[in-house]
Image (cartoon, coloured by chain):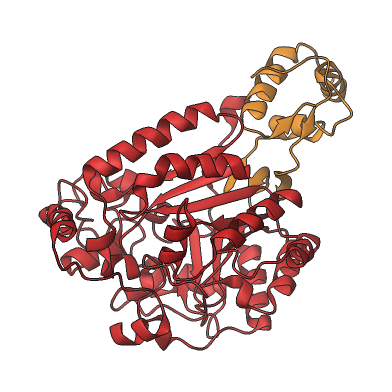
Chain colours: A red, B orange
Amino acid sequence: MAGLIKTNPTTTLRAGITPPRWLLAELTYACPLQCPYCSNPVDYANYQTELDTEGWKRVLTQARKMGAVQLGFSGGEPLTRKDLTELVKHARDLGYYSNLITSGYGLTEEKIIQLKEAGLDHIQVSIQASTQELNDHIAGTASFEHKKEVAHLVKKHGYPMVLCVVIHRENIHQMPEILAMAEELGADYLELANTQYYGWAHTNRDLLLPTKEQFEKAEAIAQAFKETVTGKMKIYYVVPDFYENRPKACMNGWGTTFLTIAPDGVALPCHSARDLPGLDCPNVNDYSVEEIWNESKAFNFFRGDDWMKEPCRSCDEKDKDFGGCHCQAYLLTGDMRNADPVCSKSPHHGVIQDAIDSAARSTLSANEKPLLFRNSKNSKLLS
Amino acid sequence: MTINKELLIQFSRTHRLQWEEAQQKNVILYPEGMVELNESSAEILKLCDGTRNLAQIVSDLEHKFSTSGLTNDITAFLEVALQNGWINQN
């Protein structure tokens, strides 16, 4: 019987189009933290408007009707939205499995109880490092002790607790301490997310990208630890694709599974797609989720393989990785239709080694430029 | 991990088993993940409500589907379920 369990969604709505399963609701770009690898667009300060409560409820209802079932409340910091509990309640009534993706900043026990009663299923707390000094430096905000307290409270109130640590050059040496901290806090899941270099992380890449040696050492430590916690803690390990020879199957295939709604209502096939040129990403204020998913130019752009150029077009692995990440192709080669340059078959693959070399030189430089923290002032500078 | 034959079996409090209309199947939901279930897997898990042990689950299902000899299949599935944290025994 076990062999019959499937993990891939297969329902078909229209020819060739599968329904969304995951809805990422980026409720706001407001955030008390300033992490220099934030996945929000660097020019987020230009997008000040936010969908109102009724707008979000409508989106949740429409996406659920199409088959979306996993829901992430994200941001920015979703706790800054005053209607969060109301939206959680609405999501629960619709049958979503709701995930709150938070820095934990400002999360009180009272709020944790209130969200539980409203039907929130799980809370993912991010911690930036295993020490207060480094955590507070990376977060740009004194938050370490409070985050640990929040992690305890999340457990206390019966939520599965997911601890998320983004890994980069400043904290990768703390891998053993990070793992010990996760165990001490009783994390049910630990997400070790090697930084993906888009948005703010792209801007700060020279200061964040670890060397191959650092990465391999940290990965070996994490793998060994994984075996000791089987059955107690699940580890999600997000690989740093700069040290791979094949690209990731980004978003499980464009427009197949994931739907992101940005704070202002713009619908995105992936949370970085806002930066891609000419997609004309539609807004939920103008169209229904069903129209957006089925009909829009943006969501159909990279469906199938008609868009592919060589080497993807004739590649026997194109059904496995779908050409990789289009945002990465755009950022590093200037054309989003190119193969993700992480792929060793890409004629642009050399840019990856250039980036690695540049980051390595940066560590040796006497006048290393400082990290550019994610805040409105820097966002306006970069816009 | 193996199933203790004596102990009661309970579906995990940190997972959710639910019918998905759009997919016309039961699914298990957990942080950032989903597993689609076939009908027999779902029937087994629905009986993991903390009031039955292995023999009682087998007996109930054999009775429900007027069949016999399900012990091996059900045990094998429940061991997978235990390893994945979908069920527990206390």
Q: Is residue A211 left or right of residue A181?
A: left
Looking at the rendering, in which quadrant would you find the C terminus of chain A? bottom left
On the image, the x and y values in percent for residue B59 come to 86, 18
**From what the image shows, is residue A213 above or below residue A86?**
above
Q: Is residue A260 visible?
A: yes
**From what the image shows, is residue A135 above or below residue A173?**
below
Q: Which residue: 87% across, 23% down?
A: B60
Q: Which residue: 43% across, 72% down?
A: A34
On the image, the x and y values in percent for residue A178 come to 47, 45
On the image, the x and y values in percent for residue A29 come to 49, 78
Q: Is residue A255 left or right of residue A383?
A: right
Q: Nearer the viewer, residue B41 or A192?
A: A192
Q: Is residue A68 visible?
A: no
On the image, the x and y values in percent for residue A382 come to 29, 82
Q: Which residue: 68% across, 75% down?
A: A57
Q: Is residue A153 left or right of residue A41?
A: right
Rendered image quadrant of residue A105: bottom right
